[in-house]
Image (tube, grey):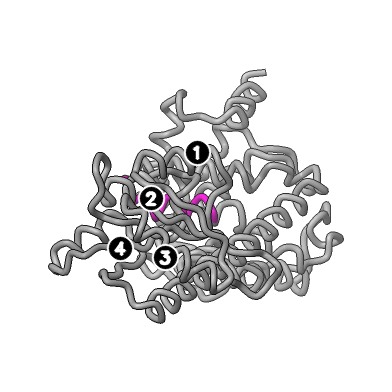
């Protein structure tokens, strides 16, 4: 059981009633809530119709759907892929264990089961699961905070969501990996969260900023990095948040990185961020026309922005199917 009032629920999947009874006795005595399924099909039906367990102990050798197939189904389904799976089998060959891990198993335990080893591994898997859930909750809080900050400002409302959309489209156009695209989408939402540490008087100032005010604004990537440290997979995400205001020529901030020193994910966010900022109204200027914005992107490619990223984004702009409603609105304003 974890450290709060929640009683962890464990689903045992085994075609042998004797094995189920033995495991249930061990786990119930340790304080866990236990349910059982006696084949793979029944297990998947339970996952569809009941509250999800905190852990699944899954036998490999079962009639019909074997444990490998069931594990793959669990790990490939969005609603269940985070549930830890311990595979349990009499098989001892290393190839069998490799196959189990390839199916997505989080742990592999051989029969006959040693009670102490079982309970220690169950406790370890559940501890990791609850830690990940805590981190996910932190992410949700930070995401909500980021969007709430923007919602109070008519000039930036929806900015981060649009940046995330543009940046993910650029990343897909450049054939980045799914993992990189996820990081870019998350960073798009969170890239400006550091502005919570900057006075609204500065952020909404209608005229030029003083040198001190400019320095304050330039602190927002580093502030955002600190705020987002609790997030899962934080290392790359933090790097992107910190470096989305670097310039390709090395004249950006906070670390004056240049060229390939800047993570590609941050270079993509920089272009998406600039495009949305230029096509949106700000306290100190009206929105720029689409023609002006695209001209600026072309002119500053290789200086402020990565020319390959700019090229990919310009290709997206030409493809009307990829344009967001926001970009279409800008074109309509220009036509009027």
> Can the viewer see residue 251 in this picture?
no
Residue marked by disc 4: 88
Where is residue 182? Give x, y as percent.
46, 51
Q: Is residue 310 above or below residue 198?
A: above
Q: Residue at position x 78%, y 48% from top?
A: 284
Depicted 190 relative to depicted 174: above or below: below
Q: Which of the 4 quarters of the picture holds residue 262?
A: bottom left
Q: In which quarter of the image is the C terminus?
A: top right
- Cα distance in 3D space between marks 1 and 4: 22 Å
Residue ranking furthest to the front: 18
Q: Name the residue under label 3.
A: 23
Q: Residue furthest top?
A: 336
Q: Mark 2 points at which residue?
A: 75
In the image, 14 versus 280, the foreground residue is 14
Disc 1 residue crowd, few under 14, some 14–19, many 20+, Cα 10 Å: few
Observer-side mark, 4 or 2, equals 4
Alpha carbon of mark 3 to alpha carbon of mark 1: how far? Answer: 23 Å
Q: Earlier in the sequence, mark 3 or mark 1?
A: 3
Quadrant position of residue 257: bottom left
């Amino acid at each position: 059981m974890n450290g709060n009032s929640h009683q962890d629920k464990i689903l045992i999947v085994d075609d042998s009633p004797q094995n189920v009874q033995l495991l249930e006795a061990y786990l119930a005595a340790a304080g866990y809530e236990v349910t059982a399924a006696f084949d793979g099909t029944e297990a998947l039906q339970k996952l569809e119709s009941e509250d999800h367990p905190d852990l699944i102990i899954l036998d490999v050798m079962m009639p019909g759907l074997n444990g490998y197939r069931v594990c793959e189904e669990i790990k490939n389904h969005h609603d269940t892929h985070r549930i830890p799976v311990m595979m349990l089998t009499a098989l001892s060959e290393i190839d069998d264990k490799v196959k189990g891990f390839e199916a997505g198993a989080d742990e592999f335990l051989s029969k006959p089961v040693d009670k102490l080893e079982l309970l220690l591994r169950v406790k370890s898997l559940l501890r990791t699961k609850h830690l990940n859930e805590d981190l996910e909750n932190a992410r949700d809080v930070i995401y909500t905070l980021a969007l709430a900050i923007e919602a109070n400002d008519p000039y930036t409302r929806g900015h981060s969501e649009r940046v995330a959309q543009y940046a993910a489209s650029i990343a897909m156009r450049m054939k980045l990996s799914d993992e990189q695209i996820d990081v870019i989408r998350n960073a798009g939402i969170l890239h400006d969260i550091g502005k919570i540490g900057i006075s609204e008087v500065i952020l909404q100032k209608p005229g030029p900023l003083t040198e001190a005010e400019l320095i304050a604004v330039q602190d927002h990537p580093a502030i955002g990095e600190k705020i987002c440290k609790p997030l899962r997979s934080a290392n790359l995400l933090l790097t992107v948040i910190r470096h989305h205001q670097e310039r390709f020529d090395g004249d950006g901030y906070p670390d004056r990185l240049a060229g390939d020193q800047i993570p590609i994910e941050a270079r993509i966010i920089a272009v998406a961020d600039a495009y949305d900022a230029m096509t949106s109204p700000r306290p100190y200027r009206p929105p720029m026309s689409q023609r002006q914005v695209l001209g600026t992107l072309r002119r500053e490619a290789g200086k402020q922005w990565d020319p390959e990223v700019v090229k990919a984004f310009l290709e997206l702009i030409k493809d009307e199917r990829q344009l967001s409603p926001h970009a279409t609105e800008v074109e309509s304003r220009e036509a009027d």
